[in-house]
Amino acid sequence: MKERTENMDPLLNMREITVELPRRVLLRGVNLSVRAGEAVAIVGPSGSGKTTLLNCAAGLVRPQSGTVVVAGRNIGETSDDETAGHRLSHIGMVFQFGELMPELSVVDNVALPALFAGYADARERAAELLSLVGLDGYGDRAPEELSGGETQRAAIARALVCEPALVLADEPTGSLDEENVRLVTGVLLDACRRRGAALVVATHDASVAASMDRSTRLRGGVLESLDLLPDALPADGGRRP
Amino acid sequence: MNAASATRRMAVRLAWGAHREQRLRLVLLTAVAVITTVVSLFATAVVYSLMEERERFDARAVRLADEGTRPLVRVNLRTDTWEREQFPVVWLDPLDDRDPRALPPGMKEWPRPGGWYVSPGLASLAAGEPRLAERFPGASVLADEGVLHPGELLAYRLMPSGGEMGADILEATGFGGAREGRGMPIGDDTEIDVPAMALAVGGFVGVPLLLLAMTGTAVSAPLRAQRMALLGAIGLPGRWRRRLLGYESLLTTGPGVVAGAALWCAVGPLPDALPLVGRPIAAGALVPPYWLVLSVSAAVLVLFAGLSLVTDQIRRTRRDRQSPRPRAGRPALRALRLAPAAAGAGLLVAASLREGHAAAVSALSGTVLLAAGVPLALPVVARLLAARLADTSADPVRMMAGRRLQYDPRSAVKPLYGIAALLVVVPVVAAWMASARQADPPAPRDERVESVVLRGALDRLDIEKFTGRVPGTVAARIHIVESATANAEPSARLSAACSDLGSVLGGEACSRPGTLRPAAAERLRRIAGLPMPLDPKLRPPPLREELTKTDSLLVLGARSPAFELELRTAALRQPVALTVLSEDDLATRESKLVAWIFGGLAVLVSLVFCTLAIGVVDRSAAGRRDARLLIAIGLTRNRVREIAGREFLLGYGAVVGSGLTVGVIAAAVWNSLDPAVPYPAGVTLVTAAVATALGAIGLLGVRGYGTARP
């Protein structure tokens, strides 16, 4: 497991992010900082720009202005290939419908990032993570054999296989029932905290947001309830009681 | 809004929607519709024009008089040759030259005695070739209904006064309309065997067109399937569903079909020769009648609509595909796919154990089954290969490529079906063509001496005057002597003087009077093209009264460009019917079908390439969806391209390996039917090289098109 030293520098630091579409501005001067081990929810209605914000954090979308620093690297100054490599090693992504590849088994799906990152024990890591998320023994199954909740848990395991510094989850519980929402949210939080990873969750579910350390709202392209700098936070990190 | 109008509006959205995949489908399917329509009309026009030529061919066949029926005209069929093309020269002797009933088609009145009627093609050729023109002085030109096509060479001659037609005279009541067995054709009908040509067109054009249409119909299929599943889940009744699909097909392919038909009607009349074959055709022959154009266009529309309905029906029979968001599962492959290939292989084995006609039929049937069966079996082969690669590879790129191909081999290899069929068919066709070409090497020609053989009314020929046209020419009668011993081959003897033969050969021809030297005898045998031994004993030179209508006269002279030309002109200027057979006439000729086969293969390869291109673009577009996820996980674009490229190469390797292996074996079986013919190794290598080049193009397309910025 990667060691995460106690470090007050945010793992994700987004400054003055602006993303414009031909007919409207999606994000205006958004600032977001997330520290190691912190879980932040970004709430907002559909079309508010939550996915775009996460994609900017992952380097999948380049903003018209602003900087994005992930694990000490400004991904706005790197090439596409360098960004992809940084993403493979330092960022894990969870999508709304899991998005497992039907042609791979569950364990191969989970191991995929680690395989491409060159980990010799990729499948062992994947098996361990499947146990962690409560899918022990599911490794050889095909993705179509999993339920929605099981798929999301497998996707969480995939996001964590390379021990990323940052996990970005876009509506991870959007298609789940209430019981699975609780289960998946719990698994996500627990797994990230064990590894000291920063977690950013885009959601419209109030119960999910309430489980996070803090919440921010995206409305009209602007992020409310900003978290600017580590030393601006109270000593307890501003976590919810 | 009622159900009918809602269905139409839905069809418009389905066909002309703004979704990128829908637009891709519209563009590609329109292109496929244009190509399918143009090629269909071309193929239809070719068969239709051949049918019309067949009608004209039958209409000019000599109608033999029945026993007891008074003939109206006596006919003798001869030939002439110009630049290695042999053509008919028909002698006519009407019993009443004022009776128009026995006029051949295209001839409006009987010419004067000794007069000529020639085809437009021969007239045109003679206009530019004085040496040809002098054979047919003052010739009139046949009308179009008397010839198969404008380029055909054909001549009729009314027997001159005091002339003689020789042996093999046909007593006829006219031309055309003969009952079975009572017609003697004029000319060669190899190229107008309509059923065989229609079958060949079906094989070379119809099958690859169908594959192209299937590939085009499958473009962006998952999106359509999802839309249709959603409509089904909502509750759209079956008949409205079928109407929706029909309208959608019409909207996507209709413009392409109309454009294709208009394009063909515009360019079809332009060629005066058959494209890819080079054979002259009648003016406008490549544009069928308007009713046929409409019928073919309608048939193409129905084809696309039918394919759309069939594929939708196949999907609907799978319960797991009826949900708008089906749970992905590995598509199943039935073992039944292997049946045609297995049957084809069995027939090839049977062919190798049989002989003669039965062996040829087995080999042909086996090849046809394999050409269809190998593509069908490819997904099974590809899945097995992919599984092996994925299971044994530590490289994640290879593992991913293998798993993807293993998961859905059918989609991966479907655009390559045509290539597999090509690899099976081409070596076999090459082996067949080698047989058709009768690949015995031609006999070497004498450097100094040339010969022609004269046949016909030799009893009325003034030999000295005839041979006097070319100084130094010698004539020798050929006698065929049957052997007294049973089963022994006959031999030939010449009637000629030693001095004459010596003057031609350039040395002493005889060892003693009346007996040829062995070397001279063998040299004369080769010069004359005699298949049997030449007896060295000579008979006295031919005297006119000794020659008969059934004899052959060998005419020898110094090799020169003028030798054959002068003798042919001299023969046709005689008042007696003669046929001159030169060394080229006696040599084996390449079948006229060879040009057709090359043309058919060119069409086949072109359509296969189009299918490959369409399939690669569609597959690459599908790959873009997968590429987004892989890039989001953290793979670079190059890595994603590598995976797509390896997957393509693995599938393509399965296709080329299977097709080539089967093609080589099938060609070997064909070859074993005629061991004298060499194996078509060169053609097989060229085919493999073309397949490799196509694969390289496909790989570039997959790698270049297949990634997208998410």
Image (tube, coloured by chain):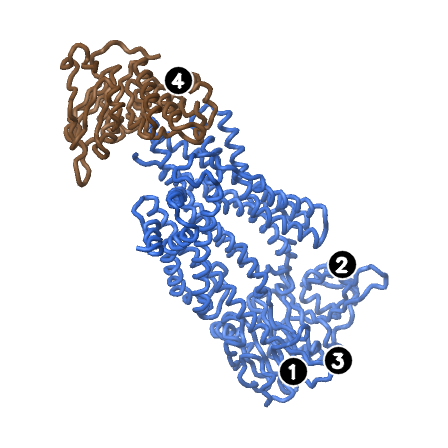
Which of label 4 and label 1 is nearer to you?
A: 4
Is disc 3 on the same chain as disc 2? Answer: yes
Tell me the CA gap for discs 2 and 1.
52 Å
Judge the density around disc 1: few (<14), some (14-19), many (≥20) Cα neighbours within 10 Å: many
Measured from the top left, where is residue B700 in percent x and y? 39, 39
When asked about the image quadrant of residue A40, the answer is: top left
The quadrant in which the C terminus of chain B is found is top left
Which of label 3 and label 4 is nearer to you?
A: 4
Which residue lies at the image location 78% right of the left edge and 62% below the top edge? B511
**What's the residue type where badge 2 is placed?**
Pro
Image hue for chain B: blue
Give the labeled residue for mark 1. B173
Q: Are marks 2 and 3 in contact (CB under 8 Å)?
A: no
- In the rendered picture of this protein, how many numbered marks are placed on residues? 4
Which of label 4 and label 2 is nearer to you?
A: 4
**What's the residue type where badge 4 is placed?**
Leu
Tell me the CA gap for discs 3 and 1.
33 Å
Judge the density around disc 4: few (<14), some (14-19), many (≥20) Cα neighbours within 10 Å: many
